Image (tube, helix red, strand yellow):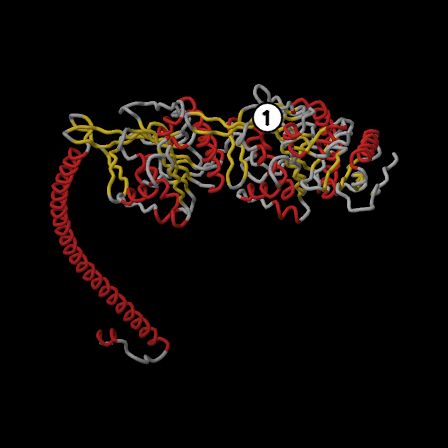
Amino acid sequence: MPRKIGGSLRAGYNQSSMPATSKPTSNLPKVPTGINGFDEVTFGGLPKGRPTLVCGGAGCGKTLFGIEFLVRGATQFNEPGVCVTFEESADDLAKNVASLGFDLKRLERTKKLVIDHIYVDKNTITETGDYDLEGLFIRLNGAIDSVGAKRVLLDTPEALFSGLSNDAILRNEMRRLFGFLKQKGVSAVITGERGEGTLTRHGLEEYVSDCVILLDNRVQNEAVTRRLRVLKYRGSTHGTNEYPFLIDEQGISVLPITSVGLNHPAPQERISTGIRELDRMLGGPGYYRGSSVLVTGTAGTGKSSMGAHFMDAACRRGERAIYFAFEESPDQIIRNMRSIGLDLGRWVKKGLLHIEAVRPSTFGMEMHLVRMHAMLQDHKPGVVVMDPISGLVPSGSLHDVSAVVLRIVDYIKMQRATGFFTALMAHDDMHSTDLSISSLVDTWLLVRNIEVNGERNRVMYVLKSRGMAHSNQIREFMLTNRGVQLREVYLGPGGVLTGSARIAREAEERREEIVRRREEKKREAALRTSLAAVEAKLAALEAERNGYKAELQSVVEEDSARRKAIFVDRQELRESREFKVNGPVKEKGPLAKEVGL
Amino acid sequence: MKRAKLTTVAVAPKKPAQYDLRLYVAGQTPRSLQALRNLKQICEQHLAGNYRVEIIDLLQKPQLAAGDQILAIPTLVRAIPKPARKIIGDLSNVERVLVGLDVRPVE
């Protein structure tokens, strides 16, 4: 059965949500509902060509489930549908679901949908003798055949029980109705109001044995959470948990979040923390993309500011970011961050940053989770900041909150987004959070206060950071009007030096440095002088050397000239002597003159 | 299966009928025939020619079912006088049919 679901992230669920031994696929043909997340829970959708019972109390979303099944079928899977409504009129129905973007009238015009309103007015009906509901069958049959429907919604046939009094006939006809639907080969959704102690008031579950889905609308801690459970799915594996679901402008979203597993990818890429010194503490480039970062600390230690830096850096890179704020309004956050030189407002305007400020007590835990899921899916951020997760605790039990945070951490990871969480700690020096999520996160930074010399100063250190070399140093953490700055701390006789003690120490170092500089300069000058003297001497010697060289040269040259002259004269002499024997002397050489020959 | 004849049975068309009745059936089932027999008897006995009966077979004209909100078969609709009323079943209980039609039984 092909799964044609839009979300690309959904693939991860299927592999992880069932034990490895049971295969999520089955031989039972299924028809995708197109309802966000539901097809994952049921591994493909509703049983094809069979009726499914959707039951639940008033206002739990039964009708909407059925309508969305039809609308998605008609628009996404080219499966026309028939909606038989026994309670609402076709007009009312169309109006009610228009707010969810479902245009039933248009679907009717384009022959993708038939809506038939069947009602029984008890006041105008008299029953006498035997009858059957053949009229209903004929109408249903006609409607199915008129558009070639593959999907049918009956909402809810139980209404007949209040209109007609002969229960025996009705029961028999109900059985016949479900048989008829199967025989027509349509995938049907039948809704039923939940009765006391039974799934439906009139026991429709007796007739629908293939698939039963239970919707629930529960109040917990004064907050309402909608939940969905697949009670029964004959011939198919299915998720058995209660899944929270949400009804919003896009219809129903079911979240198979309890089944998120540990198979998220681990990118190599590193992204900046937004604070250069902190990047350096983490070995240079910053956090791993897709990791989760926890910052813990007591009140007023600058946790949110670190988150703001991180988001600012992400937006500068052109990535999207979401800020789930549980304590401040968006305006207040933007104003406050401006005081440390961060202009988050421009990112909000650009649409890169989305600040979602909501009080933790506004919804139940599951609802928070569902909303976050929906928002993560819509916004597709690279960076998610939740500030603070400890703020969620009042709206649920500690166990609930831990479970939810775990899921959200996993979900953010699976989205390849980087999660940044802050947690408030009641006491300094606590190396564990109340939420016990510290073991889940990859990088844990701790900010704490040090009170000394009548000052309170912040220090920060990296408690752990998986998969990267990180500094073991404590840094002083300062909030300046140019953002967060980290400074090295000094070890003095009384322990680490921070604040003014550090500043004094820094001033002292600067003074020492100046003195050292001055001395160095002096020595340098002395050496230069000596060097210059030696060089002058060298120059004089060089000149002397050159003089000797020149003298030597001239001596050598004179010498050779003389020798040459002697040689020539001797030659002439010899020649003149030879002349006396052989012929007249043509010319007298100089030597010959000299000698007087 | 034999189809019921789609006929307008104008039993007493001499003057404008005070009662305009429609009997919806689906094929010639024993129950439908029973209903038709019962209806004839009741009309003759209690409406004294002041009526008109139309028999509609939904197997042949299924599209007519929605107009009168027909669900049960057989259904007798009293279209006139207004407001419309419905009597479902094989019309075997004469008293209930007369109550449904709002007709006083002829002593």
- Label 1: few (<14), some (14–19) or many (≥20) C-alpha neighbours in 10 Å: many
Compared to residue B64, the image places residue A187 above or below, namely above
Assign a secondary structure to mark 1.
Answer: strand
Relative to A214, is A340 on the left or the right?
Answer: left
Say which chain tag 1 marks: A
- Which quarter shows the N terminus of chain A? top right
Residue A396 lies in quadrant: top left
Image quadrant for the C terminus of chain A? bottom left
Q: Classify A97 as above or below A45.
A: below
Is residue A280 among the parts visible in the rendering? Answer: no
Vertical side of A107 occupied by A324: above or below: above
Percent across and percent down for residue A224 are 46, 29
Q: How many marks?
A: 1
Please name the amino acid that badge 1 sits on: Val
Drawn side of residue A326 relative to residue A94, left or right: left
Near-viewer residue (B8 or A581):
B8
Q: Residue A370 at what x, y percent from top left?
A: 48, 33
Give the residue number, with chain letter if any, for mark 1: A230
Q: Residue furthest front?
A: B107
Q: Nearer the viewer, residue A428 or A280?
A: A428
